[in-house]
Image (spheres, rainbow, N blue to C red):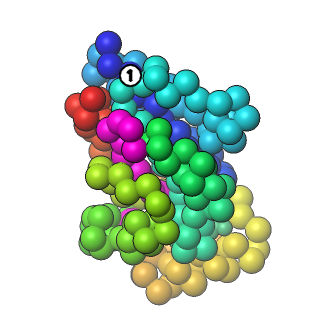
Amino acid sequence: MKSVLVLYWSRGGHTARIARRICESVGEGGGRAEMMDINEAVHEGVDWGRYDVVAFGAPVLYGTYHKDVFAFIAQHQAPLEAKPSSFFNVSVVARTPEKATIEGNRYMQKFLQLSPWRPKDLKVIAGKVDYPSWAWYERVMIQLIMKYTHGPTDPRTVIDYTDWDDVRAYGKHLLALA
Ligand SMILES: Cc1cc2nc3c(=O)[nH]c(=O)nc-3n(C[C@H](O)[C@H](O)[C@H](O)COP(=O)(O)O)c2cc1C
């Protein structure tokens, strides 16, 4: 049975939900999948030999990724490159079709510039707007992005932009990379 490791960093829990859906989909496809927060991976270690494919996902925060994402990659570049691997990013700008492509999503381009690990397989996933759960200064920042990209600015807005069927298809795709 092919096995997939889904590593992730998540601030608000949405990327964790995506990782979980990916794992469910791998299971539906006849594979085995495990998800692991990179914080856990750093502290508990990863038995890389157990997996045929590795995926790694992180949300975009303030136009980039949390420093722990790059620290993890720098530390584990060799095992990440040793087998088929994929990176997925999660952002609210990816809610529009043109920014949901690898070329059209500047945060994906930024990842490729900053990461020493260059996975051949990449995936852009739309995330969640959740103004009520964010601090006022975070809300203001996202409202600005939204104003600029013609998205919702009402501070009561909670919208999940993730295409969950597409996430499921990505899980199947990962299994096929094995
Ligand atoms: C502090 C903060 C900054 C963010 N910055 C951006 C951004 O620059 N561009 C963008 O498209 N989305 C941005 N987002 C939206 C997140 O990428 C989105 O909410 C994602 O679903 C969060 O995933 P998580 O719950 O796993 O942390 C930001 C969200 C927060 C809370």
Give the vertical position of 144 relative to 162 (above or below).
below
Q: Nearer the viewer, residue 8 or 93?
A: 8
Indicate yes or no whether the magenta region holds residue 91. yes
Residue 113 % position (x, y) = 43, 71
> In this picture, which residue range is highlighted in magenta?
81-94
Is residue 98 shown to the viewer in this render? yes
Horizontally, residue 102 falls left or right of residue 76, namely left
Residue 149 % position (x, y) = 43, 81
Q: Residue at x 55, y 70 (%)?
A: 64
Residue 122 % position (x, y) = 33, 54
**Quadrant observed for ligand 1 in the rendered image:** bottom right
Quick one: which residue is furthest to the left in this view? 176
Indicate yes or no whether the magenta region holds residue 51. no
- Disc 1 residue type? Ser
Q: Residue at x 63, y 55 (%)?
A: 71
Dividing the picture into quadrants, the one containing residue 170 is: top left
Quick one: which residue is furthest to the front in this view? 78
Give the vertical position of 32 relative to 20 (above or below).
above
Dividing the picture into quadrants, the one containing residue 176 is: top left
Beta carbon of the mark 1 residue lies under 8 A of ligand 1: no
Q: Residue at x 30, y 45 (%)?
A: 166
Q: Residue at x 29, y 64 (%)?
A: 102
Assess disc 1: are there few (<14), some (14-19) or many (≥20) residues with their C-alpha within 10 Å of its C-alpha. Answer: many
* Location of mark 1 (residue): 3
**Considering the image in quadrants, where does the C terminus appear?**
top left
Residue 19 % position (x, y) = 49, 38
**Considering the image in quadrants, where does the N terminus appear?**
top left
Horizontally, residue 62 falls left or right of residue 137, namely left
Give the vertical position of 164 relative to 160 (above or below).
above
Is residue 131 shown to the viewer in this render? no
Q: How many marks?
A: 1
Q: Secondary structure at mark 1?
A: strand
